[in-house]
Amino acid sequence: MRRYDLALIGFGGVNRALAALIEERGDELAQELGFALRVVAITDLRAGSLVDLDGLDLAPLLATAPGELAFADMKGGSPDPRNEWVIRDVPADIVAEATFTNPADGEPAVSHVRWALEAGKHVCTTNKGPVALHGRKLRNLAAEHGVSFEFEGSVLSGTPVLRTAQRLLSGLRITGVEGIMNGTSNFILGRLEDGADFEAAVSEAQDLGYAEADPTADVEGHDVALKVMILANEVLGADLRSEDVFREGISGITAEDIKDAADKGLRWKLVGSATRRADGSVDARVAPIALSADHPLSGIAGPVNAVAFRTDLLGTVTVSGPGAGRIETAYALLSDIIAIHQRHANDAAASCGHALEETVHG
Ligand code: HSE
């Protein structure tokens, strides 16, 4: 059975949840999907790095509280994350990148992805930065090295938005995409409708773990702007930069705005959209919009996210589901690994068929 050796870059909530999935469901997944997964390296800013080319024993690592993990004390461990060395030099098939990303330049995640692709390793990442800011360059680099660059978790965590567009909607012309892509701001707008005050709603969202470390990224639309760029570039084939996306957050919405909208049967939502114009260019924006009850996004409540695709033959197709969460985002990485396996299994079958044809006709 095909086995993939993984290097996990970042061992926070998401890659820990991926490791737990591999530990708990590895056999079941192998049976269902026809491949096995083994973790050979982990790096983490706080814990350091740990390498075992025969496969790490994940159970004791998962049994240790995140703050107490210290790889330096273990065989094959170091107090230093050694990210570049692990990514470039430790033999692994797939690098699962789940560190942090600076929204201005996408680092350090961009370098992690680039090192892995240059080393001929497949990459799956949950980070928006590398995809939104350098997606095209990194896709080309992956193609140059004959490997895959997968990033389903960069938009709506494990809810399959990008793969839905790329695979299930293929053959349709997608003319636009709009979505509720930030659970924190959607939750806050809902609490405002319930009569809560803005600051209280923000701290409630933080307590519930929806908000980014700095909730400005959520309420001022920066988080959604990156997701809009990803959708515009990956689904509509645009080549937008941050400055091409109009952005307005929800901090200006008042209790009066909420009441006025409710009186008219409307609901305020923070909507991110990318729409193809008549000249072929793409208009991309994030702004609060008061939606009527018949709009496909108006009923999306609480921290839930949804993306509606406007298509020529099916009209509007909407995908809804979680947009954040450790396990939900770890599932995105797993779905990327499955995509990598399927693509390369198909490539191998095609080259095998080609060789057979040459033998028959040669
Ligand atoms: N903080 C984001 C949200 C999730 O509230 O939806 C990650 O993009």
Image (cartoon, helix red, strand yellow):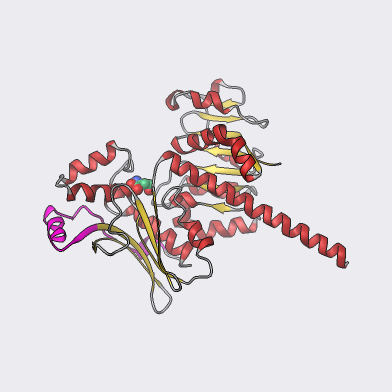
Where is residue 38 shown, x and y percent of the image? Answer: 62, 35
Q: Which residue sits at x=87%, y=68%?
A: 361
Depicted 63 relative to depicted 106: above or below: above
Note whether residue 186 is visible. Answer: yes
Who is closer to the viewer here, 110 or 307? 307
Residue under the image location 64 percent in, 58 percent down: 144
- Residue 303 picture location, percent across and down: 31, 47
What residue is rendered at 49% in x and 28% in y? Answer: 47
Q: In the image, residue 74 lies at what x, y percent?
A: 57, 22
Left or right, 204 with respect to 156, comes to left
Residue 106 appearing in the image: no
Left or right of residue 348: residue 65: left
Of the 4 image quadrants, the one containing the C terminus is bottom right
Classify residue 344 as left or right of residue 115: right
Does the magenta run of residues contain 250? yes
Name, please, the residue furthest toward the top. Answer: 73
Residue lying at the far right of the rendered structure = 362
Q: Is residue 66 magenta?
A: no
User: Which one is nearer the viewer's eye here, 265 or 201?
Assistant: 265
Q: Is residue 128 left or right of residue 304?
A: right
> Could you tell me which quadrant the N terminus lies in?
top right
The count of marks equals: 0
In the figure, 284 relative to 54: above or below? Answer: below
Specify start and end residues of the magenta stretch as a single range. 241-268
Q: Please state the horizontal and vertical placement of residue 227, each as a whole percent of the image.
A: 40, 56
